[in-house]
Image (cartoon, helix red, strand yellow):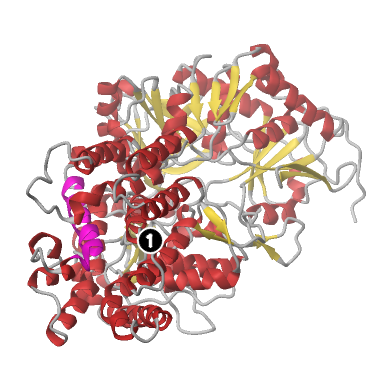
Amino acid sequence: MTRPRVAPVTAPVVPFVRGLAAHGTRPALITGEGTVSYRELADRVAATARRLGPERRLVQVVGGNTVQALVAYLGALAGGHAVLLVPDGGGSAAALAAAYDPDVILRPATGSWLIDERRPGTAHDLHPDLALLLSTSGSTGSPKLVRLSAANLTANAEAIADYLGIRPDDRAATTLPMHYCYGLSVIHSHLLRGAGLIMTGLSVADTCFWDLFRAARGTTFAGVPYTFDLLDRVGFADLRLPHLRYVTQAGGRLAPDRVARYAALGRRAGWDLYVMYGQTEATARMAYLPPDLASVRPEAIGVPIPGGSFALRPVPEVPADTGELVYTGPNVMLGYAERPADLALGRTVHELRTGDLARRSADSLYEIVGRRSQFAKIAGLRVDPQQVETVLGRHGVAACCVGGDGELLVAVTAPADPATVRRTIVTECALPARAVAVATVAELPRLPNGKPDHRAVRDLVRPAPDPAGPASVGPGSTSAGPGAGGRAEPARSGDALDRLCRLYAEVLDTDDVTPESSFVSLGGDSLSYVEMSLRLEQELGGLPPSWHTRPIRELCPAPAPDGDPTTTPRTRIGRRRVVETSVALRAIAIVLIVGTHAALFNISGGAHVLLGVAGFNFARFQLTTADRRDRLRHVRTSVLRIAVPSVAWIAVALLVLREYGPANLVLLGGVFGAPDDGSRWHFWFVEAIVHILVVAAVLLAVPAVDRAERRWPFGVPMAVLGLALAVRFDLFDLRTGHDLPATVRFGWLFAIGWAAARAGTRWRRLLVTVAILGTVPGMFDDVRRESVIVAGLVLLVWVPSLPSLASLNRVAGILAGASLYVYLTHWQVYPLLVGHSAVLAVAASLAVGIGYGAVATAVGRRLPTVTRRAGGEKPGRLVGKTQWPVRSPWPGS
């Protein structure tokens, strides 16, 4: 065992960290909970530095976009220690701790931060210049690290602040991970100038992010290419951001047409787009494209940053005007570290060979044309995978390509057809078909910093043989290429993450599962939500908040911090059992409906509560961050999921039992049914949901409406509610001489549920509650029924979950999941038994409905092609074995 040594701090401290207090009371950190001034930040940083002691040590900091993580990181730098900054979550932190044996680990604990001192002194020989250790892009968790000095950090921060013109009144959002050099450079450059940081871990796809950005008067944010994909989905062009000054882009090549488009958008809206180029080995940045050139030269990386310079080194077999890009400047790293002994090294690198092939144009701008190390020799030809990606991009296909063992491996996103993609590559790139393998995935695999994960692409397209069975293409993929055949099974592995991926694939009947998928991104709906929540609770021992919107990777149990082989949930989950309120309401409501109709008791209002729950689920599972086309497909398939089993059951009742009529069969009984026929109202609730969804699909098909909903996610349902209430209170005198269908009479309840799902603040929830209390009473002149409706809707607004037991959760899940089928079938079941026993009539109705649900699901599983076509899926898109088209807002489906 190495004996700890005491090493006095002799390393230079990063100047902008030492000088935090000089910015006084200026806001340094802005969060949803409040603001931290520079003086307060300096005090916290100093306290952390004192807590770490005067001995210079190797300090591992678990990074995260939180105030506590930033204070821990800055405190370690302020104390003159060598900082190993690692990602928050996953196995990378544990792997790097095992490889480098840090003296101290700073990591999040329950409600606070833990300083884990593993020894009193240091076990390492640390070079005086060493300030920071970062993983290289693409090697997160690998023992290979980049060694950076205080001078590197300072020089790069100053250069960035210079060419961006960062001002003290600027406020930058932390849209990228702190452990990623690009995200860290945003922090450094703004602290240097005394500017503010909007500390958040929210995604730009989250409405709450933009609420915080506006409230904090945000002036800038940074993005990698994937960030701009998300911006396209959320309708960024229509967002109102009055203080935005500029947007920066780096972390990979953004297609020139998109650079030009965003540059033009910025000109119209009054902000600039800075396209930048860099590597971790250069601390962060090496080049930037002046914003006035982004529209005319969108393919270029621009000019070197202040203090840096480029040279082109000749490379065999490339054009004479092209060479490997070599960078020199004060931000070039000290060198790599591959083992603890390397921490004693001084500077071993004086120039940075980037590995990128570039050329310099006549206007002195540099342009990247390929990656030297990624060139593949396939069938005797030199192939640049990035150029293949560009070719596919011109055909509207998002792809990630890597060179394999004599073949090109290509991952593409659905709905691209692997066979068509393969033919395109063969035709345009002159490659033999046998040398191209293509896999379709739900999302291109990415590293935590948002860059493409080339190793994951290799594993997806050509996974290693599985000793437990035949090789698979991997979760969420199909392949076209040598040896490819048919549908892939999820990889068989005892790994906890793999188990969760298989669970999602099973419950959602899809192969499009990756660790970055979430329940919502996979098209989960209220039926699968119930089953998934119960299954996840069994797997994890509890459910974390908002689990349905979180990537599977975040739910996966991770190794305990102390290295114990046992696993603990990555998210702290309590042992107390709860049931989500919407699920409980669905289960209770269907029992109330059947019990009231069978005269077991008289508690009406259950169906009206379910209409509110339907609106609530519509907002959660339909109005996601997906693009407009996907939203429309989801709504369309939702209509079919409700309509197909409904029409099937009504057809049997019509043909065999001679009940109902043609109007009921086409779900228009409330519109065209005979006024004196009581059965015309049997399916009013099903008809109302179908009609509302059809109207929603028509409205969302209008781009302006789709953009408005994304921009004002709470305002739009409140506006819809206002229009619907005009009918509720008959402001247009529609009821005179008319028997209005339920869709028109009760549609406002759906809007209330929709607004409840979007009411993210206390004042908004109060506003929705006032709407409930002001509109439900007096609707039926039945206090008991109105009380049930008010109670159910208010619970939906204010109470996310209710205390429960495991046994109750299982019962609630079964009833909620089968509520559509119970509602459909109970009209034919309870009349047969109610004369004998009301209890038996209710029990039989529930049992038959549950059974019909099982049959309908089994039939749906055997008809993937029919339902895929019914749902509007294009040929070639893998959707798996669909249980009637997916993504229904039906409250019990």
Q: Secondary structure at mark 1?
A: loop
Residue 254 place in picture, x, y as percent: 34, 40
Is 602 magenta? The answer is no
Q: Residue at x 33, y 33 (%)?
A: 300
Type of residue at label 1? Answer: Leu
Q: Is residue 140 visible?
A: yes
Q: Quadrant of the N terminus?
A: bottom right
Q: Residue at x 46, y 46 (%)?
A: 450
Q: Quadrant of the C terminus?
A: bottom left
Q: Residue at x 74, y 56 (%)?
A: 98
Quarter of the image holding residue 222? Answer: top left
* Number of residue marks: 1
Q: Main secondary structure of the magenta part?
A: helix
Name the one closer to the observer, 567 or 463.
567
Q: Which residue is mark 1?
A: 522
Is 694 magenta? The answer is yes
Residue 571 place in picture, x, y as percent: 62, 54
| Magenta segment | 681-700
Taking 440 as reference, is 12 above or below it? above
Quarter of the image holding residue 132? Answer: top right
Apparent side of residue 781 relative to residue 4 in the rendered image (left or right)? left
Name the one closer to the observer, 798 or 280.
798
Q: Residue at x 15, y 87 (%)?
A: 656
